[in-house]
Image (tube, rainbow, N blue to C red):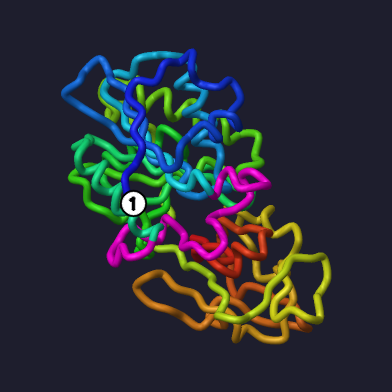
């Protein structure tokens, strides 16, 4: 698969509405903008999921500004078709297709894998000094970053956008797991409906595109290390409500997103179930029985100790196909 490439697009030719801009893209697209220093480059990947518009919106504003970055910038838009399928920005990926951010490792046999492979080739060819993968979370969250390592350069990139940095052992085939010979960080700018997400993206990209030494003057970040990922077993049914649903294996609270990045004590119910056999917890290094961290009392789900959760969503389809949330033991 070939990526369409736009080089130094005319700011006046960029449609003023972001929806029209999205519709003007011929498909997965690479946008190359020459910088003042042509000897260096930085890469931004965004719209890897069709329901994560904040990165696209920020790049749209930047392109229309016509400002020249300090170094060459390569922007890659991945899931263009999923994003513009009606209703716009609803589908994480098109029905019947794989999640693009699980396809950045062989085999690259299907169309989504071939797109991932083409994106990898373009990033390697750019020989970047840094790579950012910019996302929204599926639920409401404060901004945070995710990495598979903890280097000063990764902390510096993370601090452009967020104060929380999560170091994970999970290997799912995501972009941040790849070796481009430079630091790479995933940024979760907040939920797609969060009012703060646009400001997070604009401020972070301002530094990423215009700071001459992007790893200098790093801000402080706090670490959450080796989180567990709470997953639903295949064929189990989940939904979200303010009471138990009799035709579901698991009913989670409709306001579950309010616990994102908050400590959840053992006295706080998270939902309803008759048992925990439909759940598993994994860090990438090992998989644990969910009963190690959660318990059932009077049909309600509680934690066994204080946990800190993040990336909780109320989208039942995403909870079933991806995960319910991530968590670490508090302290």
Closest to the observer, 29 or 41 = 29
Q: Quadrant of residue 206?
A: top left
Q: Nearer the viewer, residue 274 or 47?
A: 47
Q: Is residue 95 magenta?
A: yes
Q: Residue at x 53, y 56 (%)?
A: 93
Percent x, y for residue 13?
A: 48, 17
Q: Main secondary structure of the magenta part?
A: loop
In this picture, which residue range is highlighted in magenta? 82-110
In the rendered structure, the answer to whether residue 60 lies left or right of residue 242 reads left
Q: Residue at x 81, y 81 (%)?
A: 246
Determine if the magenta segment contains residue 132: no
Q: Quadrant of residue 187?
A: top left
- Residue 222 visible? The answer is no
Q: Which residue is mark 1?
A: 176
Q: Position of residue 102 (x, y in %)?
A: 40, 61
What residue appears at the point 63 percent right and 58 percent down from the top-left corner?
Answer: 313
The reply to whether residue 7 is in sight is yes
Question: Does residue 4 appear to the left or right of 191 in the view shown?
Answer: left
Q: Residue at x 66, y 70 (%)?
A: 266
Residue 294 is situated, as x and y percent measured from the top left of the image, at: 60, 77
Asked if 168 appears above or below 61 in the picture, the reply is below
């Amino acid at each position: 698969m070939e990526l369409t490439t736009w080089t130094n697009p005319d700011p006046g030719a960029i449609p003023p509405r972001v929806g029209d801009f999205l519709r003007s893209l011929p498909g997965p697209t690479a946008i190359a903008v020459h910088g003042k220093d042509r000897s260096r480059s930085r890469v931004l990947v965004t719209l890897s999921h069709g329901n994560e518009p904040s990165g696209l919106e920020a790049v749209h504003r930047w392109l229309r500004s016509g400002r020249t970055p300090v170094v060459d910038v390569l922007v890659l838009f991945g899931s263009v078709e999923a994003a513009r399928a009606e209703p716009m920005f609803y589908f994480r990926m098109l029905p019947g297709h794989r999640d693009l951010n699980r396809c950045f490792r062989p085999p690259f046999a299907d169309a989504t894998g071939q797109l991932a492979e083409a994106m990898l080739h373009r990033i390697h060819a750019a020989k970047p000094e840094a790579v950012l993968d910019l996302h929204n979370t599926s639920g409401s969250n404060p901004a945070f970053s995710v990495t598979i390592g903890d280097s000063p350069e990764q902390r510096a990139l993370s601090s452009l956008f967020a104060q929380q940095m999560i170091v994970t052992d999970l290997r799912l085939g995501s972009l941040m797991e790849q070796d481009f010979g430079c630091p790479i960080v995933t940024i979760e700018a907040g939920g797609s409906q969060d009012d703060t997400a646009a400001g997070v993206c604009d401020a972070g990209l301002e530094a990423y595109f215009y700071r001459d030494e992007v790893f200098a003057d790093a801000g402080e970040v706090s670490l959450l290390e080796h989180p567990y990922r709470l997953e639903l077993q295949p064929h189990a049914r989940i939904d979200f409500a303010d009471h138990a649903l009799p035709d579901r294996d698991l009913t989670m609270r409709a306001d579950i997103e309010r616990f994102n990045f908050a400590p959840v004590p053992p006295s706080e119910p998270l939902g309803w179930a008759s048992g925990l056999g439909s759940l598993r917890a994994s860090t990438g290094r090992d998989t644990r029985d969910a009963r190690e961290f959660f318990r059932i009392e009077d049909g309600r789900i509680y934690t066994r100790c204080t946990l800190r959760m993040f990336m909780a969503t109320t989208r039942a389809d995403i909870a079933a196909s991806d995960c319910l949330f991530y968590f670490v033991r508090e302290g």
